[in-house]
Image (spheres, grey):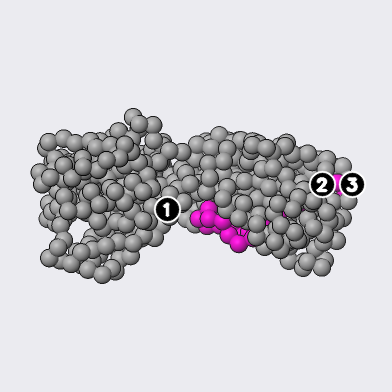
Amino acid sequence: MKYCALIPTYNNVSTAADVVRRTLEYLPVIVVVDGATDGTKDSLESINDERLTIVSYSKNRGKGYALKTGLKKAREMGYTHVVTLDSDGQHFPEDLPGMLRASRIRPEALIIGTRGLRQENMPEKNTFANKFSNFWFFVQTFTYLPDTQTGFRVYPLERLHGEKLMTNRYEAELLLLVFTAWANVSLVSVPIRVYYPPKEKRVSYFRPAKDFGRISVLNTILCILAVVYGLPRRWCYTVFYSLLFALLCLYLNSALLFLTVFEGRKPSFHKKLRRVLGKATGWFMSIFANSDYKVKLAEGAAALDFNKPAIYIANHSSVLDVMSLLSLHENLVLVGKRWVANNILFGALARAMGIIKMEEGMDNFVPVVKKKVDEGYSVAIFPEGTRSMTGELGRFHKGAFYLAEQLNLPIRPLLMRGHIDALQKTPYIVGSPKEISVIILPEIKPEDKSFGVGYRERTKNIRKYYYQLIESEVE
């Protein structure tokens, strides 16, 4: 991933150079000077930094045109992600690390810097306009965002939609947001600070009557397009893959019934059921969301060997994480919550394949896992205990690491990538990331002290290890 900042500017001679200098502390910068007449271009050209690229033209064409120009330039320079922010000093470049962190966690998502609707010196008309825009965005996409008018965003260039339809003025950013949402790209909100100068010092080129009128016309057009194109496209896509999942559950339950009738509960029953389950979930993951599904090795990692029992751990942000684990091998048993075993769609399957219920308590839990290990199985656990709604890494519980210590087993860490962008819980959307992957990380052996001594210390340090990986570009 390669990031740059894009700052469109008009007549902001008093603030633009300062914003650019502060942004250069974090990223290379492309500035588009949109026909400025007040010396803004001269102030920018005084900045001596090879990472600064200035694009300018003589006639003022509007923010939308400046954004299109800047996005095109970023592509030409080989950037994969563009962070946009305003040049009037409203945005804090010091908030860039949080925006970049969110983007690295979910590189195919559009990251939106969210301002509070009540800020010091914030004009009342801004509050109303934002609420107005949020309402119509929800109508057009059935997705709630707390701030649809912010210009502080991270655009993944490969996942950007509606760029060719962008208008030349302020409403261009709204159009980008709507078309990208219709394409089932995840939208992630990140809190940011915002500065509004006192009224007498405020500089704004927003024309209330004219620009608000243009936005209203655009909203009308987008509402019509939402009915005939955007929402049907989005719903049909999600419904199709939801039905496919239901059919998969039906097929697997049918296989369970068939094997129960013809095999009884002999040892061969479990082997055959797990084999069917692994092949079916592997097939499902290979076609789900029209994405490229891969299981690959990180640098320094050895291939998985299911002839040797181990404790498998993975980050957890989507139900697809479970499907990925099930597809790895028939000798892998999952630890889950009680509701999984009682689920109407896949509860019978979970019970038949021997899911280990975490609620049984640690004293009873260790002997149950030991029995499975003695039978030649490996055990998979999500240390977070529950799905992350944002892709952020949750707190690790100690169970997996306690088990590894008690049973003297190696830990096999797995890193899940793209699963949440393919299927997220809230809001329930089937996305279409370019790739969904399971990255096999180096094995952590019982005698390896690099992560500490004892399960408590290991829990903390292995979480830190994941924390670093999940924000990195590990492949």
Q: Give the mark nearest the N terminus, 3 or 2.
A: 3
Residue 202, relative to residue 78: is it above or below?
Answer: below
Magenta stretch in the rendered image: 375-396
Separation of residues labelled 1 and 3 (CA atoms): 56 Å
242, 3: nearer the viewer: 3
Residue 28, relative to residue 345: is it above or below?
Answer: above
Place of residue 408 in the rendered image (x, y in percent of width and height, measured from the top left): 83, 54
Badge 1 marks a residue whose secondary structure is helix
Place of residue 351 in the rendered image (x, y in percent of width and height, measured from the top left): 76, 55
| Residue 423 as seen in the image, left or right of residue 51 | right
Q: Is residue 220 visible?
A: no
Disc 3 vs disc 2: which is toward the camera? 2
Sort mark 3 into few (<14), some (14-19) or many (20+) by Cα contacts within 10 Å: few
**Mark 1 is on which residue type?**
Pro
| Residue under the point 79% across and 44% down | 331
Place of residue 7 in the rendered image (x, y in percent of width and height, measured from the top left): 27, 45
| Residue under the point 22% across and 68% down | 121
Badge 2 marks a residue whose secondary structure is loop
**Mark 3 is on which residue type?**
Lys
| Residue under the point 79% across and 58% down | 405
Residue identified by numbered label 2: 309
Q: Give the mark nearest the N terminus, 1 or 2.
A: 1
**Mark 2 is on which residue type?**
Pro
Q: Is residue 454 visible?
A: yes
Residue identified by numbered label 1: 97
319, 195: nearer the viewer: 195
CB under 8 Å between discs 3 and 2: no
Q: In terms of secondary structure, what is the magenta stretch mainly?
A: loop
Residue 417 magenta: no
Residue identified by numbered label 3: 266
Place of residue 375 in the rendered image (x, y in percent of width and height, measured from the top left): 88, 49
